[in-house]
Image (cartoon, rainbow, N blue to C red):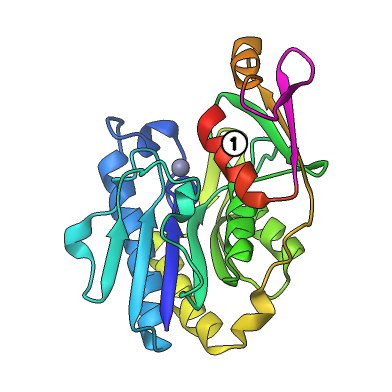
């Protein structure tokens, strides 16, 4: 069994400020250690459940946060960004039995994380078929496209609730809950224990129950924080201008959506 892990940092227990999430900021060195520990916990759970190989995508900012010297054997890690449209899910394909998403955070329109955003902070919001979309939803659809179930998600309270709404069988672990510019988080030690036990349980239960349905048609709306970004994005083939800050895009093929995002953001 091969297991895929995509890891972000804003939904890691104990991370609550942009300084802690940016490479030069105060507290970042501890944040990357906390991120590494949660990813390690997910790996251990996967190995306990019989995984032979785990591939990790370091999916925050530079893509170079996880402390690689701490990773166990039978793990490979994707660092940096290739430019492939799968982005936070790079190297995922149908050879994987399951995907797990660690350290995820709610979308730009939710209050459950002081670091809430969707892909880039220059975006006010992104909608898919009329609903506000998170990075979780975008990546869950990528997994659905290659027919890999998403069995586990850890992160803030709102993103866990969103995962449950998409498929109630996804194992979710709320490690923090935002309140204004603050957050209340589990102790990292407890978060890691729950993630490790959860990963093992999730992979031992019926993984197929965690499959996600991919829509047959995609209507995308992206509202930028400024009109100049929307103007530039409107020249991508198939993209139409909405109001001054908004662009629209429609397709039947989800890969077209991912390719558009990588070029216009
Ligand atoms: Zn991030």
Q: How crowded is mark 1: few (under 14 residues within 10 Å), some or many (20 or more)?
A: some
Q: Furthest-front residue in view?
A: 237
Residue 167 spot, x, y in % from top left: 72, 68
Q: Which residue is drawn at 74% across and 66% down?
A: 213
For residue 54, above or below residue 157: below
Picture quadrant of residue 76: bottom left
* Quadrant that contains the C terminus: top right
Q: In which quarter of the image is residue 145?
A: bottom right
Q: What element carries label 1?
A: helix
Q: Is 243 part of what is drawn in magenta? A: yes
Q: Is residue 142 above or below residue 245?
A: below
Left or right of 158 in this view: 9:
left
Given residues 40 and 75, the one toward you in this image is 75
Residue ID at (66%, 73%) = 211
Residue 212 is at least partly visible in this image: yes
Q: Is residue 51 left or right of residue 121?
A: left
| Nearer to us in this view, 128 or 49 | 128
Q: Which of 10 and 138 is in front in this view?
A: 138
Front residue of this view, candidates 180 and 160: 160
- Residue at image position (30%, 32%) is 26
Give, as a single range, the part of the protein colored magenta. 236-251
Asked if residue 165 is among those painted magenta in the image, a careful observer would answer no
The residue indicated by pointer 1 is 260
């Amino acid at each position: 069994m091969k297991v895929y892990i995509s890891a972000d940092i804003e939904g890691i227990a104990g991370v609550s400020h942009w300084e802690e999430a940016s490479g030069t900021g105060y507290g970042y060195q501890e944040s990357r250690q906390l991120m590494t520990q949660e990813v390690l916990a997910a790996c251990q759970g996967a190995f306990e459940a019989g995984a032979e190989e785990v591939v990790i995508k370091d999916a925050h900012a530079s893509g170079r946060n996880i402390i690689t010297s701490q990773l166990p054997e039978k793990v490979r890690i994707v660092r940096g960004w290739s430019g492939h449209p799968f982005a936070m899910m790079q190297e995922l394909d149908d050879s994987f039995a399951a995907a797990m998403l660690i350290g995820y955070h709610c979308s730009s329109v939710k209050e459950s994380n002081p670091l809430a955003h969707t892909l880039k902070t220059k975006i006010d919001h992104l909608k898919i078929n009329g609903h506000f979309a998170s990075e979780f939803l975008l990546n869950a659809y990528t997994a659905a496209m290659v027919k890999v179930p998403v069995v586990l998600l850890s992160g803030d309270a709102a993103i866990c609730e969103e995962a449950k709404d998409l498929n109630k069988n996804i194992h979710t672990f709320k490690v923090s809950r935002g309140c204004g510019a603050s957050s209340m988080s589990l102790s990292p030690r407890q978060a890691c224990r729950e993630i490790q036990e959860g990963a093992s349980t999730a992979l031992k239960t019926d993984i197929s129950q965690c499959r996600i349905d991919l829509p047959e048609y995609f209507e995308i709306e992206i509202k930028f924080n400024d009109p100049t970004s929307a103007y530039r994005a409107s020249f991508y083939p198939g993209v139409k201008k909405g109001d001054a800050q908004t662009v629209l895009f429609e397709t039947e093929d989800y890969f077209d959506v991912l390719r558009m995002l990588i070029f216009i953001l």
